[in-house]
Image (spheres, rainbow, N blue to C red):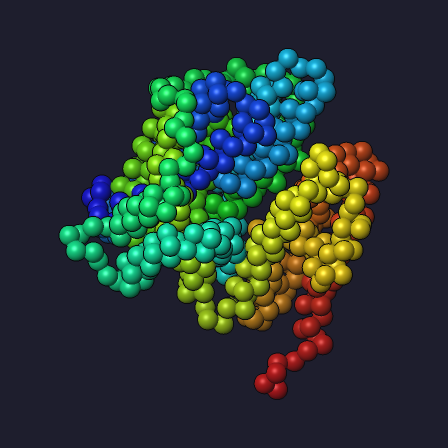
Amino acid sequence: MRWFVRGDIDGFFGLALDNLVQLLLIDALCRGVLGFSDELLYGRVLPGVAVSLLVGNLFYAWQARRLAARTGRDDLCALPYGINTVSLLAHVFLVMLPAKLAAEAAGAEDPARVAWMAGLAACIGSGLIELGGSFVAERVRRATPRAALLSTLAGIALTFIALGFFFRTYARPLVGLVTLGLVLLTYFGGLRFRGGLPGGLVAVAVGTALAWMTGLAPIGPVPERAAQLLLPTSALGDIAAALSAGMLVTYASVIIPMGLFTLIGSLQNLESAEAAGDRYPTRSSLTVNGLGTLAAAAFGSVFPTTLYIGHPGWKAMGARAGYSVLNGVFITAVCLFGVLPHVVRVVPIEAGMAIVLWIGLVITAQAFQATPRAHAPAVVLGIMPGVAAWGAILIKSALRAAGWGGPDGPRFDEQQASLLDALNRSDIWAGGAFALEQGFIFTSMVLAAVTVCIIEGQLLRGAVWCGVGALLSAIGLMHSYAWTAGDTVIAFIGSDQGGSSGGGVVAFLVATAPWSSAYLALGVVLVAARWLCRPAAD
């Protein structure tokens, strides 16, 4: 298999755009929410991001070529790799922001730096969970129905990837629909542009031109910050200080569920790649994923890395190994030279969003195409928690846009009863949406697995999955949430919301009982059905 083929150009545009979106999010949150200085963000965090992405992208490209040489194939697509968006948000709002606020209350000289050190500790913890989990993940993969693994990804792809950009497509219809049409012609219509031009390149070029013609670009004034080379430096001393200050233990209630979330998500992406025809070894793939997160922290990044959703899409584009190399080199250059604001100003997100939207379509379709036809109901049920989680985020975002949760508006935690009552009267059962939002990736797996077991008549196995759901619910990895001033966040056993004393733990288990007992009751129903029911054919 060659290092670079024509399809790698298309794959590069899609993956690079996805990574650019993460960098924009990092830039906005680190400066706007955490108050990071340019020196801390551009001099420490982004160079660490560059190290982690370059190492991972190069490894997965090499892995694809090595497997191609071993199997004699030339159609293998490297596993996509990047920053974990969910952990990114969790580390900002549930680790670094509380650390900053606590440091400010204690009169610390540099609260932003304290927040950064807390993020380093969280990143180290996540990397250790990913690395340790790589040795047992294959057993989990073998025990889990494919519908349970792929439907979760479909829910994420349909909502967090596709629908957001679909809204944006119709908010900017000229750019959005024209570029979407170009992508559909190329990748679903089986057509090629004359001259051998890659469809992704044509879509981005046309989208950029339309954006400039319609006033969407350039975005804002020319950035004042000049490009300059900022090489990564070791953060091991800061990590040691953070660990000695007990930050790893302090934020364990966030680090543990987020680390498990990343591990399971990467495992599901490996299953998605195998369903597309590329079977990569679980242990080595997840090991390097964990090492990438540890490398990120070692050089100053506070954001874990993950195997990305979208492998079937990149493969269908014709991407092989080269797109991963190109992405790693490009993102490294953007991070080390500080040119992120310049790139985004010239090439707006609208120019390439059709590619990401198409990836969401492919992933959602794969959940149905790569599973037995009889398991389609399980896939649909597995998609629904992801849709609910996205809906919960929309509800809260709309409330914040209306002034709720802000410094001058009503607080969520002080108005929770009246807020839920008002939403219920509008037939918006937000309490259920907020419960589904927490740990929705586990909820999707459990519900889809139980449904597959019922379809296949494996009722005892389905009851075991119900027991898994009850355990995850009881300790707070699923459903349990706590109100804050402007959000609902996961309440994990042992956290401030979950209680750390004996009485607190008991109270937490009582609070989670509605969900854990429901899963146990469902398990009892499945077991009893062996004696209470008979096949419909009789």
* Residue sticking out furthest to the bottom: 538
The part of the image, by quadrant, that contains residue 337 is top left
| Residue 91 image point, x, y percent | 58, 33
Q: Nearer the viewer, residue 229 or 130?
A: 229
- In this image, 171 relative to 451: left or right? left
Determine whether 529 is above or below 54 in the image.
below
Taking the spot 72% from the left edge, 54% from the top edge, the residue there is 431
Relative placement, left or right, of 273 versus 31 is left
Q: Residue at x 54, y 23 (%)?
A: 36
Residue at left offset 26%, top offset 62%: 190
Query: Residue 150's x, y, as percent?
Result: 48, 57
The residue under the point 54% across, 59% down is: 383
For residue 95, what is the image quadrant? top right
Whether 285 is drawn above or below 36: the answer is: below
**Residue 84, placed above or below residue 242:** below
Can residue 479 be seen here? The reply is yes
Residue 135 as seen in the image, left or right of residue 344: right
